[in-house]
Image (spheres, grey):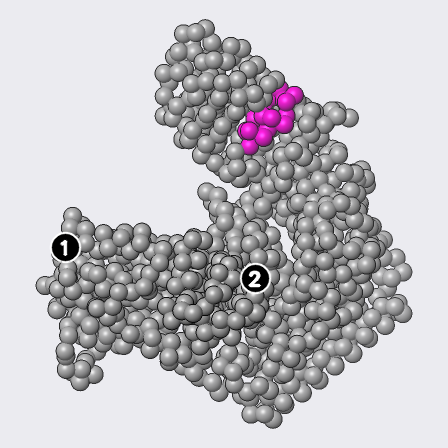
């Protein structure tokens, strides 16, 4: 992780080259020289990370901590120099006397300070290099040695290499369905093709257990030749081929293999298996390339041969160029978790002569559920506690699980380490960052990717935006089963979660490596721990009320969850001047942010969630601000200069209660501007947006005529398909007396059917249009009594497959328009009972069953059928009347 601390600084530094402003003197050249020193340091730190993972050379921890201090100091210098450069390059009419540059005393003082700090940091870099040499810490570690640090230890690999015992009945709970399905696929007599059956799931989910159970049941009874091959992270082509020869071909002269090339061995295996009905299990396949190296050894002679593989990476399961069957291994439910725990924690020898087992079983239920359905975690916990039948120990474990104490029963941390070590440096920090969110927190992908980008975790990749790369990281972490997909739209992943066991493991590693410090009390903020490196990121939970900037100076990231419990009169912004990321989550009520926030000139990301915020005018001094994210908050007053900050790229606000719109200007660099509910949104704003250079994504909610008509338009995914996660946090926030409502904003309503709530809440609504995939669900239901005063309904470009119109819904509906809802095959029968329905328009829906259209026409209703979408007319929301 040390290497990435420097890499992140270089990533951000490279993104904004310090301007060659004459008044800056030698500062730009000095900074470029300093960046070159950091690049050299980065090479050393790659070795440092590998050695620290193996527990080598404790001196490294101290040196690495110092390197990170230097890296962050360089970042502050670069930011400060850029701010100074922007100030001195402004037109004279704006700066007046200050624009005279180096002749101005304050400017000279700041310039001197920057130069002096650069010299100090440069000297410290040189000292660190000398210390590396002094303690014989060099970059001599070879590729193979580094790779070994990311591999399984020998005892773990030996356990995995143990072949199934055909007489052993593998102990399984909760996997009956998966076992039967895999068994049926292996023995399907009608399927003669060579078929690859993949078991996919996170580490410790029971993939190998299922495979072993099925292998024991069917291997020798139904196949002529069988082999169980452990691939793992130590995969070599020769080693895998040798194991296949040994398993599938039986006794062989292995000295002969030593003289053969890999291709010759592949041909030998292929020739042997082409006359056999064979079963080969490839256990623990990590990479697509591993499959590619051995697939040529397996002939498809249409005789029902099978290959089964287990993997943590879903990309591997989708890769084989053969008939594929993919089985995702589910986690255990509560009852299965408790049964498995009881079997491990209460073996027969502990049941005799004890009269306190009921107390243990009650605690055992709580402990079993802490494994969150992950079999390995439950087995390890149960095995450990079976040898620690002390009620105080069990109660302590209920309060806080210590996985390290249970290593003798099975080192779950080491098993999870394997998944972590297989990640790139960028993916490692991205994964650890997700673990900072509270337990069971559904993390919006749009929020997550913007935080990653603001932290500098996302590298520049030719031909791709940072947002595209970040979204690719989310998808890869999901493929590797390190995160769980909570919600997904037709185009992208929208929210993710982390399994509790993985989160606990990740938080522990993040603490040790100084990646972040999570605190639930004042004491934890103010205490330094000997086994943890200094952290520049802090996560506060619950009611932490402290001068965190004083206790932990030079913080770069501060995330505050459950902020509603924060004592706002006590919380201080003092000492947070170097902060890059500030995020408040879960605030309620009204909070006036202090004017001191304007001193945080290095801030790149400001996130506010929940509650109502009053922003001081000083927020306009945040001259490095990249993202202002208040998508789930109300801004009471929007400072007139906030949107003119030149570095600002993204602005997301749920509601603005007041602003001096006539004095507000929007700078041309904005990429996305989303404001849902606004007290006033004049026509001039649309013109300002049209004049922007990069034509940003934008969405305005417009309040007109005493808030009786509302139009929500725009795009909730940017041009790269990255979700901006705009959503209506609560439909009850829509004005109750709305008469006309138009929603044309992709994914705005996600897949939660809005009609029941809209129908019961907006009882005065006359006109409603929902379109442009604002709602992504398959079923739409209009309950009885809903929309009592609706006259005109338009459904446009939705993916609904079923529309249910209950008796008594929309009793006053007169005009119904359906356009481009191509998955809807039949109209609801309830339309026949709408006595006031006068007109039905069906446009661009060739697959719709027109029987009901005919019946409505016969009953005297006007029915218009059109094949082209050009005939469609949107609901018109009258423009703001000046």
Find residue 275 and report its image quarter. bottom left
The quadrant the N terminus occupies is: bottom right
Q: Residue at x 76, y 57 (%)?
A: 622
Task: Establish if 52 lies above or below 748.
Answer: below
Residue 755 location in percent, x, y?
55, 29
Residue 489 in percent (x, y) is at: 48, 43
Magenta segment: does it hold 487? no
Of residues 678 and 169, the one nearer the viewer is 169
| Along the viewing direction, whichever of 221 and 305 lies nearer the viewer | 221
Residue at the (57%, 14%) spot, across then down:
812
In the rendered image, the vertical position of residue 612 relative to residue 56, given as above or below: above
Question: What distance separates the C-alpha of mark 2 from that of mark 1?
Answer: 47 Å
- Picture disc at residue 435: 2
- Label 2 crowd (10 A; few <14 / some 14-19 / many >=20): many
- Residue 302 is tagged as 1
Judge by depth and name the residue closer to the eye, 511 or 239. 511
Q: Answer whether residue 765 is magenta in the image.
A: yes
| Residues at circles 2 and 1 in contact by the CB criterion of under 8 Å | no
Provide the residue span drawn in magenta: 754-769
- Tell me where residue 89 sits by quadrant: bottom right
Query: Residue drawn at (80%, 61%), measured in percent from left and top?
Result: 572
User: Does any portion of residue 483 appear in the rendered image?
Assistant: no
Secondary structure beneath disc 2?
loop
- Disc ID at residue 242: none
Instruction: Indicate left or right for 324 with 735 as reference.
Output: left
Image spot of residue 289 (x, y percent): 33, 66
Q: How many marks?
A: 2
Residue located 69% across and 24% down the image: 737
Query: Is 443 above or below relative to 508?
Result: above
């Amino acid at each position: 992780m040390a290497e990435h601390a420097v890499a992140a600084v270089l990533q951000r530094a490279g993104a904004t080259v310090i301007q060659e402003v004459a008044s800056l003197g030698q500062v730009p050249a000095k900074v470029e020289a300093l960046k070159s020193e950091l690049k050299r340091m980065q090479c050393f730190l790659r070795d440092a990370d590998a050695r620290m993972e193996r527990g080598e050379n404790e001196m490294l921890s101290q040196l690495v901590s110092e390197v990170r201090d230097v890296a962050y100091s360089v970042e502050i210098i670069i930011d400060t120099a850029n701010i100074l450069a922007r100030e001195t390059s402004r037109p004279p009419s704006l700066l007046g006397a200050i624009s005279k540059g180096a002749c101005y005393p304050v400017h000279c003082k700041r310039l001197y300070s920057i130069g002096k700090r650069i010299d100090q940091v440069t000297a410290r870099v040189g000292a660190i290099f000398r210390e590396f040499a002094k303690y014989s810490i060099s970059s001599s570690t070879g590729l193979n040695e580094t790779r070994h640090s990311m591999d399984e230890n020998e005892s773990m690999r030996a356990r995995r290499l143990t072949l199934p015992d055909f007489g052993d009945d593998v102990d399984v709970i909760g996997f009956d369905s998966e076992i039967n399905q895999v068994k049926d696929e292996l023995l399907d007599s009608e399927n003669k093709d060579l078929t690859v059956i993949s078991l996919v799931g996170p580490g410790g989910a029971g993939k190998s257990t299922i495979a072993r159970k099925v292998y024991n049941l069917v291997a020798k009874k139904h196949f002529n030749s069988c082999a169980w091959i452990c691939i793992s992270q130590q995969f070599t082509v020769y080693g895998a081929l040798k194991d296949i020869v040994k398993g599938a071909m039986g006794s062989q002269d292995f000295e002969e293999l030593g003289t053969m090339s890999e291709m010759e061995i592949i041909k030998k295996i292929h020739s042997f298996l082409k006359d056999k009905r064979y079963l080969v299990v490839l256990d623990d396949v990590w990479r697509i390339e591993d499959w590619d190296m051995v697939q040529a050894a397996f002939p498809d002679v249409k005789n029902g041969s099978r290959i089964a593989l287990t993997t943590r990476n879903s990309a591997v399961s989708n890769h084989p160029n053969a008939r594929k069957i993919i089985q995702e291994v589910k986690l255990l439910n509560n009852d299965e978790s408790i049964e498995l725990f009881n079997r491990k924690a209460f073996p027969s020898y502990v049941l005799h002569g004890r009269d306190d087992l009921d107390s243990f079983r009650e605690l055992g239920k709580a402990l079993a559920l802490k494994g969150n359905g992950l079999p390995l975690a439950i087995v390890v916990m149960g095995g450990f506690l079976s040898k620690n039948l002390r009620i105080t120990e069990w109660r302590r474990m209920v309060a806080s699980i210590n996985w390290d104490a249970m290593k003798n029963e099975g080192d779950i941390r080491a098993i999870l380490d394997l998944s972590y070590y297989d990640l790139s440096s960028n993916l490692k920090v991205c994964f650890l960052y997700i673990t900072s969110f509270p337990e069971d927190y559904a993390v919006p992908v749009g929020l997550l990717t913007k935080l990653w980008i603001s932290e500098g975790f996302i590298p520049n990749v030719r031909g791709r935006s940072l947002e595209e790369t970040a979204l690719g990281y989310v998808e890869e972490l999901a493929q590797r089963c390190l995160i769980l997909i909570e919600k997904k739209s037709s185009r992208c992943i929208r929210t993710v979660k982390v399994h509790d066991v993985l989160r606990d493991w990740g938080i522990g590693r993040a603490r040790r490596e100084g990646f972040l410090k999570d605190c639930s009390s004042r004491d934890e903020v103010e205490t330094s721990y000997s086994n943890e490196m200094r952290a520049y990121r802090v996560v506060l939970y619950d009611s932490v009320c402290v001068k965190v900037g004083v206790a932990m100076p030079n913080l770069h990231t501060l995330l505050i969850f459950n902020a509603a419990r924060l004592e706002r009169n006590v919380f201080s912004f003092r000492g947070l001047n170097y902060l890059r990321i500030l995020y408040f989550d879960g605030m309620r009520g009204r909070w006036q942010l202090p004017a001191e926030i304007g001193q945080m000139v290095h801030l790149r990301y400001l996130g506010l969630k929940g509650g109502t915020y009053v922003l001081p005018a000083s927020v306009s001094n945040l001259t490095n601000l990249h993202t202002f994210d208040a998508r789930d908050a109300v801004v009471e007053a929007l400072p007139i200069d906030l949107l003119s900050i030149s570095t600002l790229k993204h602005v997301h606000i749920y509601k603005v209660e007041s602003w001096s719109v006539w004095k507000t200007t929007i700078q041309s660099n904005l990429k996305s501007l989303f404001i849902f509910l606004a007290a006033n949104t004049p026509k001039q704003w649309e013109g300002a947006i049209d004049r922007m250079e990069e034509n940003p994504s934008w969405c305005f909610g417009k309040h007109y005529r005493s808030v009786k008509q509302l139009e929500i338009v725009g795009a909730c995914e940017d041009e790269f398909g990255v979700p901006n996660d705009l959503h209506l946090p609560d439909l009850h926030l829509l004005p109750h007396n709305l008469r006309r409502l138009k929603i044309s904003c992709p994914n705005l309503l996600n897949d939660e059917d809005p009609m029941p709530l809209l129908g019961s809440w907006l009882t005065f609504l006359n006109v409603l249009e929902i379109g442009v995939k604002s709602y992504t669900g398959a079923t739409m239901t209009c309950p009885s009594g809903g929309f009592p005063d609706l006259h005109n309904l338009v459904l446009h470009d939705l993916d609904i497959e079923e529309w249910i119109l209950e008796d008594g819904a929309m009793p006053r509906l007169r005009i119904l328009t359906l356009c481009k809802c191509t998955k809807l095959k039949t109209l609801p029968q309830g339309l026949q009972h709408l006595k006031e329905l006068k007109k039905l328009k069906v446009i661009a829906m060739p697959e719709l069953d027109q029987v009901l259209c005919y019946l409505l026409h016969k009953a005297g209703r006007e029915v218009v059928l059109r094949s082209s979408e050009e005939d469609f007319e949107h609901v018109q929301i009258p423009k703001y009347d000046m």
